[in-house]
Image (tube, rainbow, N blue to C red):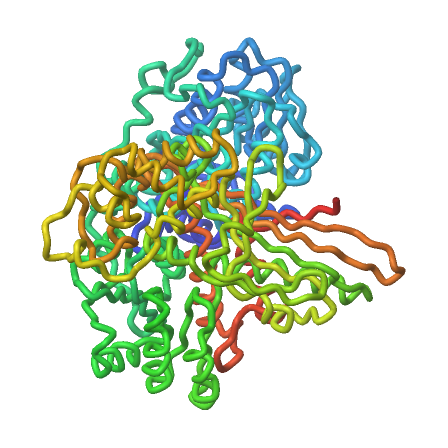
Amino acid sequence: MSVCSSVAPVHQRRRLVQRAWPGQALSLKVKKILHVEKSLYQDVLVFESETYGNVLVLDGAVQCTERDEFSYQEMITHIPMASHPNPERVLVIGGGDGGVLREVVKHDSVKEAVLCDIDEAVPRVSKTYLPHMASALDHPKVTVHIGDGFKFLQDKKNYFDVIITDSSDPEGPAAALFEKPYFALLRDALREGGSISTQGECVWLHLPLIRNLRQTTRELFPVADYAYTTIPTYPSGQIGFVVCSKDASRNLRKPLREVPNCRYYSAKIHEASFVLPQFAETALNEGRYIAPNVLKSDEKASKKVLLLGSGYVAGPAAEYILRDTKNSLTIGCRTLSTAQSLAVGLDRATPVSIDVADTAALDKLVTEHDVVVSLIPYTFHADVIKSAIKGKTHVVTTSYVSPAMRELDAAAKEAGIVVMNEIGLDPGIDHLYAVKVFDEVHAAGGKIKSFLSYCGGLPAPEAADNPLGYKFSWSSRGVLLALRNSAKLYQAGKLVEIEGKDLMSHAKPYYITPAFGFVAYPNRDSTPFREFYNIPEAETVVRGTLRYQGFPEFIDTLVKIGFLSDEPKEFLAKDKAGLPWNEVTAKAINAKDTTEASLIATIKSLVNFPSAAEEERILSGLRWIGLFASAPVTPRGNLLDTLCATLEQKMAYSQGERDMVMLQHKFEIENKDGSRETRTSTLLDFGVPHGWSSMAKLVGVPCGIAVQLVLNGVIDRKGVVAPYDAEINNPIIVALEKEGISLIERTI
């Protein structure tokens, strides 16, 4: 909706000036002031305009005019209604002027239409001054409920066929209507096959917001799309609608019937409304902003952030950081073209080339910024922190605090800087919700007897279509090397140590929900976390990794036949032509020849398969990788990296595939009275097809939040820190939950 100046200037100038967006305005000539009041919630103004008839203005924002309101009311209503096969129960949130209701009751299938608006003044005033819109408020199928839409939705589960949110812009209280928790409420209030439509802002002004809405709704609904209408008295003459359905087969773009007595809507305009101009299509579907960017940041007001790195998580982090218009971002990568690629479409982002091994250049660049975000390999973090100490620049990383980083704690404190670490997913979100429960239990006089924490970044089930049930969203080498790490943990009061070569044999089935078949295995050293988390009483402490069933046995086979070894092999030298895979396999396992029968016989002598079925499954997987074939390898010096060259091609995510993150904490608690309980804290999240992966979002967004909280002075603890206590964690949790990211706690 367009924003206007206060009521007093309208009286004085006899002209309404709409400040639709900084730097632009639309004015309406006022013929006569009809009504002015201050309701319990907002300023209410109605005036007769010279050319648009009566105009309703709430808190300075034009809601509707008699001349053009029909284009908005018809489109926000009939797109979800006409594409639904049989909409019987309809809810309108907001829309107290009655315009949406007027369109709803045009559908003969409707048996019940409910309007929920928080302000009784809007329908009351509309009946007097906008009677053509408000006529449906007294329709026999309509019930008007004055109250909070959030509360109303919480009490209505699995009830409505269509829900339409006729909201104002995402400012103040209305901002909540554009966030994930609200869309989750809408989804839960719908019956199976239900649809929603919400006000979706303007492609000329709000593309980042619209893209975020698309990503958010696609995480909750199998079908989510964006359509638009034209309306001259809204900002830039255009406004859109986010339209979603719970029915994965629903074609929201295709009306199923004609709608009578419309002045804007038709079947043809319904279908055409989803066809976006190229600049908007590119921004929403690809995340690239190709429209000219003529906005300049205010250098005096700007907070300067340096982001080093361009991996998968950099995009969501950069996007979050730049939501605050006071922030500017410098993206530093080794190659300028890589930084430029990440900067495309990001307002106030400047790409630069930086070699972090060049200490002088790094010192200079870091000193010019308020915060440096280090998303480069962890081995370089200490160098970045040293530059930050010299320049008195705060630091944020998503990595574990290494010994080299911890050694810089005193120097960081002396420099007066925050070095915030471990603020991604794992580590990061896992810490936040573990510490939350620990604090609650201790505050109630209880004890933590056992703590299990497992996290897995996996393909969504429909994309888990290879023998390992896994795909790479980051370095395949890093993933495979992690499988060689030794592990330490506490189990029933005893220290347990596991050698890397035996790690996969310790993987066990792990039940979270019947929908998934997971296995879990420990990840590195869990023992320091008894101290970090302040749970000295815990007898069991395990932090580990989740994979789909069948993965550990497959990896264990690769270990036993030597393919996770990074020992240099002359026959795999990078400057040599690639040998056939079967010859490489024969050399690796000392088979007598390169025939498949010989290779399989040798593998069976090295691996003790538990059953014939398991033997066939794993051998079939090795065949799928190509170890028995005559195709040439891409030599990378050793077996591990040569294998990675093939897996990176065979196990990459395809266009449109989703990833998935499952994180669960399990707490065994002894309460103050001696009773026992088991509590879980669980996060299940899916990536968005053609959008951010779940892993990228769940690492990048917490990182971006931490940057903003450091800039705002909310996180102000000097030195090398990590999220291990409530003072640091609680503000991050609040911000995360606004993004719809949280763990669900249950007592089982």
Quadrant of residue 23 within the rendered picture = bottom left
In the image, taking residue 395 as reference, residue 425 lies left or right, namely: right
Q: Is residue 109 above or below residue 674?
A: above
Q: Is residue 10 above or below residue 463?
A: below
**Res. 382 in view:** yes
- Screen quadrant of the C terminus: top right
Quadrant of residue 199 within the rendered picture = top left
In the rendered image, residue 266, in percent from the top left (x then y), is placed at 36, 15
In the image, taking residue 70 as reference, residue 283 lies left or right, namely: left
Quadrant of residue 158 within the rendered picture = top right
In the image, taking residue 280 as reference, residue 5 lies left or right, namely: right
**Residue farthest toward the right in the current orientation of the protein:** 673
Residue at screen point 10% across, 57% down: 575
Residue at screen point 55% across, 68% down: 723
- Screen quadrant of the N terminus: top left
Q: Is residue 375 above or below residue 41?
A: below
Q: Nearer the viewer, residue 526 or 306?
A: 526
Residue at screen point 89% across, 60% down: 673
**Residue farthest toward the bottom in the current orientation of the protein:** 414
Q: Nearer the viewer, residue 604 or 549?
A: 604
Q: Nearer the viewer, residue 592 or 432?
A: 592
Q: Nearer the viewer, residue 193 or 339?
A: 339
